Image (spheres, rainbow, N blue to C red):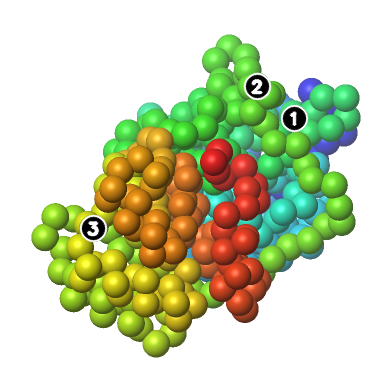
Amino acid sequence: MNTNRSLLLIYTGGTIGMKENPLTGALAPFNFEQIASEVPEVEKFGFTICTESVFPLVDSSQIEPEFWARLVELLEARYDEFDGFVILHGTDTMAYTASALSFMLPALAKPVVLTGSQLPIGAVRTDGKENLLGAIEVAAQQEAGRPVVPEVSVYFNHKLMRGNRASKFGAARFDAFRSFNYPYLAEAGIHIRYNERYIRRPRCGPWMAYKKFDTHVASIKLFPGISFKMIEAVLALADLRGVVIETYGAGNAPARKEFLDPIAEAIQRGVVVVNVTQCAADGVDMKTYDAGISLAGTGVLDGGDMTYEAAIVKLMVAQGIYGSPSGVVSFFLSDIAGERSF
């Protein structure tokens, strides 16, 4: 591997950067500038790896969109200095952050690899070392002087996933993330095998970054017996601009008037309503069943095979860019960063 390359390792918080306090037994962050003392293998790469921590360090369950904007500002400020970036992040909201960065950096042409771990990096059986070393190798990999994976991705348990296709799958297993609707970008064994046909090529054009969000969105997950009055109350919120409805199967929902009418009224007021499936795999097709056709008739947008995480974050980004519902709709239905197949 070319020793002239340089990477920036960004630590934001999370389990991977924790060590057990020998006196109290509690987990606490260690100085990530001393990463080589915990993972000496890092030095064997032979290229420059700089570290930077984003303070205050944050439990990923506490992350807000403002944090994503700070990350983008950091990447933007250091973009010309490094060939690639590895972001160490808590696992709980890693898929949300990966989705956000993919939409906020539409002109990205360098690797941004997120990873973390289920066990602290100082633990005897930690998955953190392999995840960190794999992410570094992916971020540094080049071919003919160009990065092999010039997009936002998640590396976890020997698998590399497009960031906006990843979802956290397990709370207490090493294969915590899956990409249900898109092939893995790479898989690591003795060698890292890249699935080049599925890796997104950079868009032509100048650098640009979106840093604003509009969080006036709501999420409604359907279940048998859900109160339509509750749904109506949510849809009637004064500042509401967007809603993601998690429907059954291929995008099906109750075909009852008391459910559909408040949705149609909200859309007429300019609220953008999106349909994504509750299923982990496959996607929405509102043309298959009457229960989906009725929902489509109100003006609800088809979320295709997008993950829930990608859909909700994309809606917030779109609303931060566009003041009009038409702009939000156009952005949402477009394939911005490989987040949807149809």
Callout 1 crowding tier (Cα within 10 Å): few <14, some 14–19, many ≥20: many
Of 277 and 268, the residue lying toward us: 268
Which label number is shown at residue 148? 1
Q: Earlier in the sequence, mark 2 or mark 1?
A: 1
Q: Is residue 309 toward the left or the right of residue 143 in the image?
A: left
Q: Secondary structure at mark 1?
A: loop
Label 3 sits on residue: 255
Of 245 and 93, the residue lying toward us: 245
* View extreme (top): residue: 190
The quadrant the N terminus occupies is top right
* Residue at 70% across, 36% down: 200
Number of numbered tags placed on the structure image: 3
For marks 2 and 1, give the CA distance. Answer: 8 Å
User: Can the viewer see residue 60?
Assistant: no
Label 2 sits on residue: 194
For marks 2 and 3, give the CA distance. Answer: 45 Å
| Above or below for 144 versus 285 | above
| Residues at circles 2 and 1 in contact by the CB criterion of under 8 Å | yes
* View extreme (left): residue: 225
Q: Earlier in the sequence, mark 3 or mark 1?
A: 1
